[in-house]
Image (tube, grey):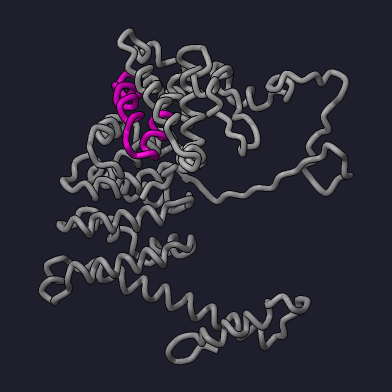
């Protein structure tokens, strides 16, 4: 039971293990056990909220007062890090606004110390991740504007990167935030991020681009008009594998939307062709282990080659698209890139494999309950909290994202 110094966590742990060690069937809790457990949990919740209030009060204190009292930047970083741990719980994240801590936290995005601006963005990212309520609260408190300012114009690259990560979490599955990002010229800021030499910054920007293009294919027009294609082509030859894959994926999204040729991607200079040929050469020289790790890149190179040049890449001819230990061929994405994705996914299997299924109907998927077992029955149960989420889905994040989240 909770004592004067907080809950008895050792006792709570022993109690939990004794009631869930798997050695005997679950039994009903007695009223005394239930009361003890609830008191312990309530005491912990109250302690966390109390601590969050204390941190919020410190955040409300002017910087000069904190410095006069001997509070160091490192100590404030520690408090923000502790706050981030608390708000990993969605309930606690939503409570931060209730106890008056959200606005002071957003104020730290303008702190004179770069490390505190970066740390505050990390906390915001945790609060809004997969949390529609907190996303709305941050939007209403002008959090997007503050994050955009840091992302676009901060002098510290780490602050810019962390702000971008928070924006990525804020706009995910949040249409009003996506619209606001577009109106704030966010795509131009993403283009500038791709032009930097910082790999982490590039990676986060690419994951966010992937997510946005997958959410709305009309944005491919914007990307093409802003000159993303040449930047993405350049990044497709990056030394960083994640950057290469994300750049190739974004190029494929734009190509699917039919904007590549219109924007001069496959012009006479043949820059993309040369980049893809170089990637094929490098893939040929990979060790077996590296080839396995580069499965996604191999598929992206082949899909993009087919989409742009209407022919299989040399990876297929050399047996490098599908390795012996890999189960099945990747879906033939390029040949369907002009179809709406849902129509392509809903196509019968015979459309992909060429098999004759005219004399055999496929059993419908059972959505509820346990149906009779059939030889062709197949079910899959998946659950994914994100993203990410890139995302995130994969962006792709997406996916996730890459992103991915983007940290």
Q: Magenta segment: does it hold 226?
A: yes
Task: Compare residues 55 and 115 and report the one nearer the observer.
Answer: 115
- Point out residue 196 in the picture as x, y percentages from the top left corner: 22, 36
Q: Is residue 63 above or below residue 129?
A: below
Q: Magenta segment: does it hold 264?
A: no
Q: Is residue 313 above or below residue 300?
A: above
The residue sitting at 48% across, 91% down in the picture is 3
Q: Viewed as shown, does residue 72 lie left or right of 304?
A: left
Q: Is residue 233 above or below residue 338?
A: below
Quadrant location of the N terminus? bottom right
The residue sitting at 41% across, 67% down in the picture is 86
Task: Compare residues 335 and 145 and report the one nearer the observer.
Answer: 335
The residue sitting at 44% across, 92% down in the picture is 4
Task: Compare residues 135 and 229 and report the one nearer the observer.
Answer: 229
Residue 401: image quadrant is top left
Residue 179 seen in this snapshot: no
Q: Is residue 41 above or below residue 168?
A: below
The residue sitting at 38% across, 39% down in the picture is 241
Q: Which residues are magenta?
A: 223-249
Residue 70: image quadrant is bottom left
- Point out residue 236 in the picture as x, y percentages from the top left corner: 36, 29
Q: Viewed as shown, does residue 252 lie left or right of 343?
A: left
Residue 57 seen in this snapshot: yes
Q: Main secondary structure of the magenta part?
A: helix
């Amino acid at each position: 039971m909770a004592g004067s110094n907080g809950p008895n966590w050792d006792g709570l742990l022993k109690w939990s293990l004794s009631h869930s060690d798997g050695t005997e069937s679950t039994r009903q809790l007695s009223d005394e056990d239930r009361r003890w457990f609830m008191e312990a949990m309530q005491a912990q919740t109250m302690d966390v909220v109390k601590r969050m209030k204390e941190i919020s009060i410190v955040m409300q204190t002017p910087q000069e007062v904190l410095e006069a009292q001997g509070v160091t930047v490192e100590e404030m970083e520690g408090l923000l890090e502790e706050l981030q741990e608390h708000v990993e719980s969605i309930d606690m994240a939503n409570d931060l606004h209730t106890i008056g801590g959200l606005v002071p936290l957003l104020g730290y995005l303008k702190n004179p110390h770069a490390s505190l601006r970066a740390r505050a963005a990390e906390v915001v990212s945790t609060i809004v991740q997969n949390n529609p309520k907190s996303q709305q609260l941050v939007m209403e408190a002008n959090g997007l504007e503050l994050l955009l300012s840091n992302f676009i114009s901060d002098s510290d690259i780490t602050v810019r990167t962390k702000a971008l990560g928070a924006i990525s979490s804020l706009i995910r599955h949040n249409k009003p935030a996506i619209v606001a990002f577009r109106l704030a010229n966010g795509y131009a800021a993403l283009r500038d991020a791709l032009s930097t030499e910082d790999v982490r910054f590039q990676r986060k920007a690419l994951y966010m681009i992937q997510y946005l293009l997958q959410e709305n294919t009309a944005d491919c027009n914007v990307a093409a008009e802003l000159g993303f294609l040449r930047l993405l082509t350049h990044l497709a030859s990056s030394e960083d594998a994640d950057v290469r894959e994300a750049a190739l994926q974004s190029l494929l999204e734009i190509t699917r939307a039919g904007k590549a040729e219109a924007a001069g991607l496959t012009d006479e200079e043949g820059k993309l062709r040369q980049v893809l040929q170089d990637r094929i050469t490098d893939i040929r020289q990979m060790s077996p282990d590296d080839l396995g790790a580069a499965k996604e890149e191999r598929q992206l190179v082949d899909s993009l080659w087919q989409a742009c040049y209407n022919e299989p890449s040399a990876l297929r001819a050399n047996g490098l698209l599908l390795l012996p230990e890999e189960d099945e061929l990747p879906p033939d994405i390029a040949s369907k890139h002009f179809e709406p994705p849902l129509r392509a996914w809903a196509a019968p299997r015979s459309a992909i494999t060429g098999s004759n299924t005219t004399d055999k109907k496929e059993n419908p998927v059972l959505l509820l309950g346990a149906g009779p077992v059939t030889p062709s029955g197949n079910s899959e149960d998946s659950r994914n909290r994100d993203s990410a989420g890139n995302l995130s889905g994969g962006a792709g994040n997406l996916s996730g994202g890459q992103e991915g989240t983007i940290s």
